[in-house]
Amino acid sequence: MNIDVRLNLLGVLGIKQSELAIDTPANATVATLISLIDQHNPGFAAALTNDSGGISPQFVFFINGRNAVHLDGMNTRLDAGDVVNVIPAIAGG
Amino acid sequence: MWVFVPMNDDQLLRYSRHILLPEIGVEGQEAILAARVLVVGAGGLGSPAAMYLAAAGVGTLVLCDGDTVDLTNLQRQILHSAEGVGRLKVESGRDTLLRLNPFARVETVAERLEGDALEAQVAAADVVLDCSDNFATRHAINRACVRHRKPLVSGAAIRFDGQVSVFDLRQAESPCYHCLFPEGQEVEEIRCAVMGVFAPLTGIIGATQAAEALKLLIGCGTTLDGRLLLLDGLGMEWRSVTLGRDPGCGVCAGRGEA
């Protein structure tokens, strides 16, 4: 199934702002998605994962406008057509 | 409660380009003149935000920052100039704002705004602008805005990346900052002093904050409430992400219930 992934403001990781159509297996989760993106962007998974395997607090994953940490974190199930936005938390002023 | 005082001839002339806009008009400009706006942070974002708000006629601007002007600030913090190095940012900033608009009332708080002082300033404000540079302050401002149901205009900038949003906490369905970036996690501060920041980026984001604040005061247009606007300054590409309330939010859950 296709997931529409929008990588936003990830220049700090050396990743250009982009929109990806990721083909995932059925029952894919956020963890699956991170692993698939990492195949084309080495270091992505390491940067976006914390020591206990959860989503790094430096980044938020919005699944159709809802923060994945408010859903089921890394285990949040994805459905065909979902729109996932990855955004870094920044506080500079 | 706003008290509208009719504009005199000088004000009608000074603000004529606003008054010509049907979305603003005399009534909208009077709302701006009667308003009290709290700007937390007199740095990269607070500089353009406060300057546009003062020039546009905001009646009372409250400028808060405990820092002094440093030479490294001058590349982007346009409230301050070379002769201001070493001065309190709020004093340097007040001088600049009054040069722009001698009729503005500028109150200053030369300390990190927190505790009762933060509560009092937020409670008294019509709109709050978060132009601060750290997550702890951002969450403290958000909590106060949730408590007092004040609209919060939040901006952030680092490197070539900018974010801006409105959390209109007067509206029951609006998310708060904590719904977007939950507190309580060990978020490493990425600071401009370490990562750098592109000078005009802070101008773009800060000016956008001023625009949203004025729209909130006037009640015109559609604000960024419920949307996070993202700017990739290198590609000069804007994106918008829809935000929803977190029903389990540790700060705003239950807001809007009887």
Image (cartoon, coloured by chain):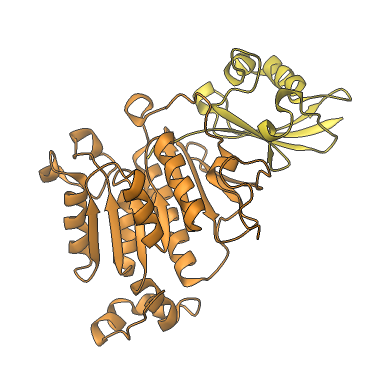
Chain colours: A yellow, B orange
| Quarter of the figure with residue A44 | top right
B184 shown above or below B226: above
Residue at position x 87%, y 22% from top?
Answer: A25
Residue at position x 36%, y 79% from top?
Answer: B3
Residue B111: x percent and y percent? 24, 43
| Quarter of the figure with residue A56 | top right
B45 shown above or below B18: above
Q: Nearer the viewer, residue A20 or A27?
A: A27
Residue A77: x percent and y percent? 81, 29
B146 shown above or below B112: below
Q: Is residue B251 left or right of residue B47?
A: right
Residue B222: x percent and y percent? 58, 64
Residue at position x 66%, y 43% from top?
Answer: B246
| Quarter of the figure with residue A91 | top left
Q: Residue furthest front?
A: B258
Quadrant where the C terminus of chain A is found in the figure: top left
Circle count: 0
Quadrant where the N terminus of chain A is found in the figure: top right
Residue B29: x percent and y percent? 39, 76
Q: Nearer the viewer, residue A62 or B76?
A: A62
Residue at position x 17%, y 62% from top?
Answer: B99
Q: Residue furthest left?
A: B83
Asked whether residue B210 is in view, the answer is no
Asked whether residue B122 is in view, the answer is yes
Q: Nearer the viewer, residue B230 or B168?
A: B168
Q: Is residue B170 left or right of residue B43?
A: right
